[in-house]
Image: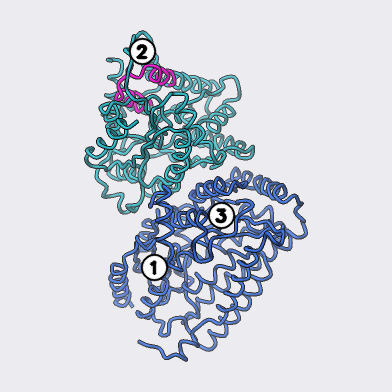
Chain colours: A blue, B cyan
Amino acid sequence: MTDTEPQKDKQKIKAAKRMREIMTAYYMDAMTARENNKKIAWITSGGPVEPLIAMDIIPVYPENHGAMIGASKMGEDLCVKAEEMGYSSDLCSYARADISCAQINGGPIGGLPKPDMLICCNNICGTVLKWYEVQARHFKVPLFILDTPVCHTEYSPEIATYVRRQIDDYIVFLETATGRKLDPDQMVQVGHLALKGQKLWQKVLTTTTHKPSPMSAFDAFFFLALIVTLRGTQTAVDFYEELILEMEERVQAGISSVPHEKYRLLWDNLPVWYQLKWLSKKFSDHNACLVADTYTSAWCSSIKYIDENNFLDSMAEAYTRIYLNNGVDKMADQVLDMIRLYDVDGFVMHSNRSCKPYSFGQMDIMNIVREKTGIPVLMLEADMVDPRSFSLSQADTRIDAFMEIIKQKG
Amino acid sequence: MQEITPFHTAINDLAGLAAGIHKNSGKIIGYMCSYAPEELIYAAGFHPMRLFSSKSDISLAENHLQAYCCSLVRGVLEDSLAGRLGYLNGMVFPHTCDSIQRLSDIWRLNTNHGFFADVIMPAKLNTPSARAYMKDVLKKFQTDLETAIGHSIAPEDLKASICLFNRIRKHLARIYELKSKFPSIIREKDLFAIVKGAMVMDRKELADRLENIVQRLEQKDPSPSSAKRIILSGSICDMPDIYSLIEAAGGMVVADDLCTGNRWFEGQMDEGIDPLEALTARYADRAICPAKHSGNTLRGENLVRLAKDHKADGVIFAFLKFCDPHAFDFPYMKDFLDKAAIKSLHLELDDQQQGQGQLSTRLETFIHMI
């Protein structure tokens, strides 16, 4: 089905333009940090950014950069370069792309601005620990590790004490690196904004409970960038307020992400950045909308642990109990909650060669979902940045077969 | 050497070994990582037993773990699901890499071997808060074991356990020391059997047997060796063939930085202090696994020092395919060796690997070249 141009224009989310402007300004700021006497910290996507914002340190996210590399289809080239440096092709493609980019200043923006310090939180994987060690050796800058032990079955008192102590270590690290003290009032304010931003992001995501859905997971993959990179700022809060208004307008006007939404799907794992357009069209052609995903919702999954009036204390728990740092059964519970909340007809799991903690356990989650809900589940083999691990023709056939089953059930 | 025969017997028939332990009313707790606190397991009256993949074909584990997971993790899960680990009375998972982390969840949800515990060790080891946490975690594990056995572990039992494992470590270290001094003193396949056997056999019997081996070796008058001096660096190395092939190619292993080797047994525990303090100090200070953090260059510096101390002619990196922590460290460690003019070879291992022809050729070429 071909949509006419005016229809297509109507379907576009207007806030996308503003979001691009904000991200451009953010990268410009980071690129010119040194001229403005500002420090730069590279930080993992699940890392505690709020103290950086409170201390006016510019956070830069190699993972966001990895996504940009993937989306601009520069992943293969940069991954190959890392392999030439001796890094196995089995390693995370974000890490491979970032490691080689740092050497040659390649990629879509000519490399990231050099860090003054590195902040690594291992709540998302053990890979970031190794990746940040590589960059600490390369840039010869100090590395702080926030070690968040995995909560297989519980957030134990031992874990709570350990992570809380490290928050203090973290502040001392930042104060040493900048030669300045953290202003407690500033920290409180940033904490408020961070929580507010996360709540708004959650609200953005839940607008898709409406049928038809005003946006899709593909939009969420794009709009995610702000809650990751600018969490704790007024900019993120203002933007998401604007985005929610637009979503509400779309709901009222009956504008949907997929023109003739008939089937609703849930996505698991990171996006396949270099095939977003193709995947989006593929599902859309089947009148299927990916209304939600486990990935973008991770940035609001631990809101319940944050105490607005005691941010530093509560951030220990909030950063430790994120989706990926839980046991597989707890992750399955969250998936089941999402299946109910978004009322989905099928579950698409990206088996992502780059991300072992996200992908191992997926088959158990798949079995639990099948058993408890009876909805069809599709597992797609791919990689988030390296296109060599993705077969388009195979994915094409498998999605067709999967949608056929959903249609028969429907 | 006949003293080594029981080691070969043990590792060639693990089920038979386990049956013997059960016959003596022993209960077996399995583990897959050199950070498993064996001293606590033993003090609680259990037999700690390291698990290796039986290297059988993967079929049942295919339903839980993708093909890009390492052969050790898939292999051990396969063994459990296929009923080959019926002798286990429990399992303990110290936190190490992402793959073992998820294996722990999958194990908990799909297998039933009795006792189960995660020992969620810190990932960084070089800060006071991490050390304090490690002690808390060991204490918690002690409590888990005590709950399982229904009574507390007597302090003297824990001390005795520490002393026994110290004895084992001391003898293993001495065997390695002699091997480095006189590389031909013991065959490569025998060294492999001793180290692997030490992770599975009855520990009291083991300590005595190791002592006998040390005595025998010390009496020997080994002939000088012109073999090339090799160091192995990597993960678990459960391939006796590699040792034999190195020997056949004209090399001798004089030291290692392996999970199933020096990293597991190096260092002694202080017998004069609080046992949990002693355990913490040893596990935090031993040569680290690449899944742990203790500075950014420690492993590279250690390897260069090891190579120099043992006058190595070459280093062979041997780690499992899909082992991320080792694969991330490999380029910089190789670079450190290059700068010290020490030659190295990288072997990617897979328990399901077929055919040793290519491996043999690569080892021969490398050993002839150095």
Q: Are marks 2 and 3 in contact (CB under 8 Å)?
A: no
Q: Label 1 crowding class (10 Å Cα cut-off): few <14, some 14-19, many 20+?
A: many
Q: Are marks 3 and 1 on the same chain?
A: yes
Residue bounds of the magenta highlight? B173-198
Q: Quadrant of the N terminus of chain B?
A: top left
Letter of the chain that mark 1 sits on in the rendering: A
Return the residue at label 2.
B217
Q: Nearer the viewer, residue B165 or A369?
A: B165
Give the distance between the C-alpha atoms of the residues marked 2 and 3, in whole angstroms. Answer: 53 Å
Q: Are marks 2 and 1 on the same chain?
A: no
Q: Secondary structure at mark 3?
A: loop
Q: Secondary structure at mark 2?
A: helix
Letter of the chain that mark 2 sits on in the rendering: B
Return the residue at label 3.
A321
**Lower sequence index among marks 3 and 1:** 3
Please name which of the two marks, 2 or 1, marks the residue nearer to the observer.
2
Looking at the picture, how far across and down is residue B305, in whole percent?
49, 29
Q: Splitting the image into 4 quarters, where does residue B183 fall?
A: top left
Looking at the picture, how far across and down is residue A26, in whole percent?
62, 67
Residue A347 numbered tag: 1
Letter of the chain that mark 3 sits on in the rendering: A
Q: Splitting the image into 4 quarters, where does residue A29 fall?
A: bottom right
Q: Is residue A95 above or below residue B28?
A: below
Q: Nearer the viewer, residue B119 or A399?
A: A399
Amino acid bearing label 3: Arg
Q: Is residue A4 above or below residue B295?
A: below
Q: Are marks 2 and 3 on the same chain?
A: no
Give the distance between the C-alpha atoms of the residues marked 2 and 1, in whole angstroms. Answer: 63 Å
Number of callouts in the render? 3
